[in-house]
Image: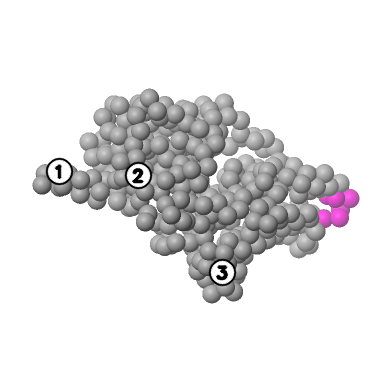
Amino acid sequence: LLYTIKFELRRTMVISIGLEGSANKIGVGVVKDGEVLSNPRHTYCAPTGHGFLPRHTAQHHRDHVLRLVKQAIQEAGISISDIDCVSYTKGPGMGAPLVSTAVVARTLAQLWNVPLIPVNHCIAHIEMGRQVTGADNPTVLYVSGGNTQVISYMNQRYMIFGETLDIAVGNCLDRFARVLKLSNDPCPGYNIEQLAKEGTRYLELPYCVKGMDVSFSGLLSHIEGTAVKMLASGQCTKADLCYSLQETVFAMLVEITERAMAHSRSDQVLVVGGVGCNLRLQEMLAIMAKERGASLCATDDRYCIDNGAMIAHTGNLMFQHDMETSIESSGVTQRFRTDEVHIAWRS
């Protein structure tokens, strides 16, 4: 009887603290049974015209993570003794930032004598999206600076219907922002989105959909090679270029998402990842979904953008199914595919 009570408590009364640091954001979140108690984060912004380098990003994470841990616990209104497990991003992501975050997670788990949970970053985006929006079994469009995938759930796996063949859509947008010398604050994609609203002329760009997959590298090379000349000659404005780029890449994403919805007979589409908070992308997905008699599930930048709460929430689900790891096995990996993870918490 005592064992049964302990087991049920473990399944229903879990407080998890999660550390996310796979790219340029370091976040710490505290989640109790799906309820977000706190979710502070800090972003490393590279100088205008530059991307963020692994060593600089890792140093940024080391500089801010302990403050964020203290802030997360304080804002959650809990004590350290209330924490049941420490969750961290195992991958995918950039090597040095992942390592710097994992070291802190290991240390906290040992200091507090609680289990350590290794979380797949992509799965965390999906599970946080499902939790916040209430989506049941949606087709998922996962779009960020490092990933572009169309995903559907089947037999305790998130199966990838289609993905980028080269660079991620967020990387495409970020790199073009450097060409235009747009600020990295708060992020390049957001600044492209705002400038695109002023665009009045659509410029035809390469459109590359291959079955269920997409390719952005050729499109990026084309617009990088022509943008400066077109701007100098007065053929278009920066706003026109941002508008044209957004419309083209988002149309590609909507096409493969709709095809996946048709294959899986889904009546919901969930968009997650940093690019997922782009309102124009959400608008295009909503139009497509409505035409199919389906609905769009989307969140704002609190949960679309990398954050600690999504790691804590997914760690919570994994903890309830004994998916913890030993300190010796608590490494990180830059390549950790979405379809590698056993989704034990879904039937």
Q: Residues within 10 Å of mark 1 (few under 14, many from 20)?
A: few
Distance from the alpha carbon under mark 3 to that under mark 2: 31 Å
Report the amino acid beneath label 3: Ala
Using the rendered image of the protein, determine whether residue 8 is visible from the camera's viewpoint.
yes
Q: Which mark is residue 318?
A: 2
Q: Element type at marker 1?
A: helix
Task: Please tell me which residue lies in front, 103 or 148.
Answer: 148
Sequence-first disc among 1 and 2: 1
Camera-nearest label, 1 or 3:
1
Report the amino acid beneath label 2: Met
Give the residue at mark 1.
Answer: 3
Please report contact status of discs 1 and 2: CB closer than 8 Å, yes or no.
no
Task: Please tell me which residue lies in front, 51 or 295.
Answer: 295
Instruction: Name which residue lies at 51% across and 46% down.
Output: 338
Q: Position of residue 101 (x, y in %)?
A: 44, 31
Q: Residues within 10 Å of mark 3 (few under 14, many from 20)?
A: many
- Is residue 247 covered in magenta? no
Q: Which mark is residue 31?
A: none
Give the residue at mark 3.
Answer: 289
Q: Which residues are magenta?
A: 230-236
Q: Position of residue 13 (x, y in %)?
A: 23, 48
